[in-house]
Amino acid sequence: MTGKFITVEGIEGAGKTTCMQVVTEVIEHQGINAIHTREPGGTDLGEDLRSLLLGHKHTGMSDDAELLMMFAARAEHIAQKIQPALDDGKWVLCDRFTDATYAYQGYGRGIPLEKIAGLENWVQGELRPDLTLLMDLPVEVGMERAGKRSAPDRFESEAWDFFERIRQGYLSIAAEQPSRVKVIDASQDLPDVQAQVRVAIEDFVNA
Ligand code: TMP
């Protein structure tokens, strides 16, 4: 039996790491064999592309170059890591996937969503996440949390309204695909956020 593909999404500072920890705890408790990975990244090539995408060396890169590099990293990630693990019956828990491309390059940068859909179909074939947990919170709260962590990367250096468009983009995706995308109110206190994630993943595992 093929494994399940779970992704975690949200703007910067939304608490994806906390979410990944709770999901891991729940699925490992069930005896499910899972791998953890992230995008952009997850392979040698993907991690090199991540450095180019997040670093400040190519600050003025074109929106199309950015989009295509995300999908280049994703193509490698699927071929080398995600699909083999799923075929092997393992679950794959991925920190960001194509919803991030719709949110950041689509809603954020303004690239038409149909262009992204074309790349999605090409690169992924039938592969789509089985469950996506969207960590949602107001941009100012996320920015404050992210700002406390480290120096801003190339995306984190964008203006506030870029992240507002991304947040709204994510919420539009969730509204269109409610059975796949579960929205977690990440503005709450940590124990409450953890409890919401626990309920969402337990519902999925027990379905
Ligand atoms: P993070 O995984 O540490 O949050 O950083 C990844 C950054 O890359 C984040 O700012 C979102 C951005 N990103 C995109 O713009 N498009 C994508 O398709 C993916 C996977 C990430």
Image (spheres, rainbow, N blue to C red):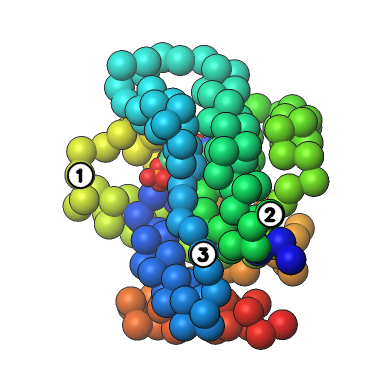
Within 10 Å of disc 3 (Cα), the crowding (few <14, some 14-19, many 20+) is some
Which amino acid type is shown beneath numbered disc 3? Ala
Task: For marks 1 and 3, give the one nearer the viewer.
Answer: 3
Task: For marks 2 and 3, give the one nearer the viewer.
Answer: 2
Please provide percent x and percent y for residue 80.
57, 38
Q: Is residue 110 visible to the viewer in this orientation of the structure?
A: no
Residue sitting at the far front: 88
Q: Residue at x 42, y 31 (%)?
A: 44
Q: Could you tell me how far apart the alpha carbons at marks 1 and 3 are, in whole angstroms?
A: 29 Å
Count the marks: 3
Within 10 Å of disc 1 (Cα), the crowding (few <14, some 14-19, many 20+) is few
Which amino acid type is shown beneath numbered disc 1? Ser
Which amino acid type is shown beneath numbered disc 2? Asp
Above or below, 183 against 79 in this view is below
Q: Is residue 163 rendered to the left or right of residue 86?
A: left
Task: For marks 1 and 2, give the one nearer the viewer.
Answer: 2
Q: Could you tell me how far apart the alpha carbons at marks 1 and 2 are, in whole angstroms?
A: 37 Å
In contact (CB < 8 Å): disc 1 and disc 3: no
